[in-house]
Image: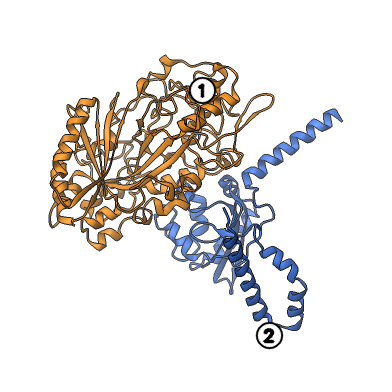
Chain colours: A orange, B blue
Amino acid sequence: MLSVEESVGGNLPARGPILDLHEIQATVLRPRPAPYFGTHVLLRVDDAQVGRAFLRRLIPYVDSAADSRIAANAWLDVGISYPGLEALGLAQESLQSFPEAFRVGMAARASQLGDDGVNDPKNWDKPFGTGEVHIGVSAFTDSEEKRRRALAIAREQYEGFSGVTVLAMQDFGAQPGDLNALGYKDGIDQPAIDGSGIEPPPVYGRPIKAGEFILGYPGETGVPLPMPQPDILGRNGTYVGFRKYQARVGAFNRFLRANGNTEEERELLAAKLVGRWRSGAPLTLAPDQDNPVLGADPQRNNDFDYANDPHGRQVPFGAHIRRMNPRDTKLTRLTDVNIHRLIRRGATYGRPYDPNALSEADDEVARGSIFLFISAKAMATIEFLQQEWINDGDFIGAGNERDPIIGRQEEGATFTIPKAPVRRRIQGIQTFNVLKGGEYFFLPSISALNWLANPTGG
Amino acid sequence: MTTLEQTHAVQDSIAEKIKKVQELYADAPEVGRIGLERMMAELKAAAGEGQQKATSAGRTGLRVGKVSELTAIWKFAPGGARRLRALLALLGGNFQGADKVGTLHNMRFVFLDNDTRLLFATAYDGEWDPYIVDFSTKLPDALDALLANLEEYPGMHSPAVGDWIANHQITADGWYVSNPNLTVAETRRLERIGKAVDEFLDKVG
């Protein structure tokens, strides 16, 4: 492996350093299986030594990114929040080396994140935002049977431990057709990471420097991001922003019906909001009607830019995917689109999308998406996206409009669909995904996990 | 929702602020004291509830609506004042880099204290902090050439550059914006629309 010191000193090699895959937790670089099943478990550590012993028991089940990508069993990832690191008894000096937004936690950064109104932390599900969530364990697998086996193993690790308490468990899994809670195939667009050894499917743009996603490697500016100390703790680790959304399916369906007279009109509107048809087929490549074959083809469904759509007549400027990755769109503000990307490990939970759900009671049905947003500067990136690209439209010439899918909408919100000769402006956009909770976790390397698990480590 | 108690509490605090100003003006020069009394009704209305007030623009600085102020004072690096003055004279106010930034309404560079310190002031949209790395990957040369004339400039690629700016910022005590909802992008858009409307009217008129 080429060390970071060697590569930073002189000219950067054309390709960045090869990542130490044996050290990086699998979830960072391994896409979720298809179909996928899993569970998020949130735990509190009441005793530092018991917490460390718990980590020791979990480590054998935490895959590294070097392990076979077709895992025979479920794999676990382990994230630790700032209160969790405190509860494990990490030294003050180390604790202080973490970025401020991580230390105070996602709920305390609500104003920077625009998590207000219905998304205000005071409305969150317990235990989010209480400071009690110390460790997050996620199990990913490709079958319900393996998920159950993995959970049984996880349970063996914490049962009988009086110093570790399970606060919440959330199952998740692919819905029929791999659709999310609003009825779209999602999670298609992932950043390609330089040096990961994973050959990405054809995608707009070049691979992004690994240091944007994993600590200890040069980022897009040519230098590594600041890392928690000591080195063994920070290197090859990364951060996760965990955000749980509940989909207001009734409100979404009512909105589509209020603004589309026929099934075709409604589905076109649904596609304009996202920039993709429900099948995942991008509007850029299928402007007039859905193309499920295209949507299902990873070699083609993300291979496009907006060069032929400078006025947003195929994909509106305010559409979800154009906001979250503007590609070559001319933005109003000086922006480097390569430094605001996140690895997303999203998963749906609860009941599947129901196109006939129309009542307000349907808005309260527990179903939605849980996102793991992964980046070496996840806190800063999520705040940037929330402030600039989700809850504002100025950056892309969409005025005050917000992301129609995950924005927190104000009264009287609109969505503009550019069209010749005159644009269509649609009223009645509501908050279709309500934030129900969130936490920041540090996702340590395998060595860092062992170091933290050691009775005298840290 | 605002309760009656909250409304009363706000009114009480406005009354207290007015009382404090009046007390401080008690020993002001007579013209100032009289001026304050004559504008009291106007002051009460401006301080009242529902008026747009300045809020924090992130780490430092003030913001009204979407427009923020950044005011900073730096010491010049040795020779920095002469270099910067020559560079500014060459540009003659034509900052193409600032145009690209897309959020800067204006900038001023004022040399203070016998060319030993620089006062920099700008009105800009939103917050600069979230874009600091964008500046360093997109505009490093222009910014390095400009800012290297100032003391202890760490370089645009340094992760410390954000703190270096924030540490020299002085939050204004007063900040007024006439069009608080007009960002640079929105202004440019309205300009284009206005022009198109005029062209249309020219054709039909």
Which numbered mark, 2 or 1, is in the foreground of this view?
2
Give the side of residue A31 with respect to residue A327, left or right. Answer: left
Q: Is residue A418 above or below residue A162?
A: above
Residue found farthest to the right = B205
Q: Chain of mark 1?
A: A
Residue at x-position 25% and y-position 25%: A142
Q: Is residue A422 above or below residue B161?
A: above
Where is residue A302? Give x, y as percent: 42, 25
Give whichever of A404, A21 is nearer the camera: A404
Give amino acid for label 2. Answer: Asp
Where is residue A45? Give x, y as percent: 22, 52
Element at badge 2?
A: loop
Residue at x-position 56% and y-position 24%: A257
Give whichever of B193, A164 is nearer the camera: A164
Quadrant of the rendering where the C terminus of chain A is positioned: bottom left
Give whichever of A321, B132 is nearer the camera: A321
Residue at x-position 52% and y-position 25%: A270
Residue B205, image quadrant? top right
Residue A284, which numbered label? 1
Q: Is residue A254 above or below residue A64?
A: above
Q: Residues within 10 Å of mark 2 (few under 14, many from 20)?
A: few
Give the side of residue A178 with respect to residue B123, left or right. Answer: left
Give whichever of B131, B59 is nearer the camera: B59
Residue B27, which numbered label? 2
Give amino acid for label 1. Answer: Thr
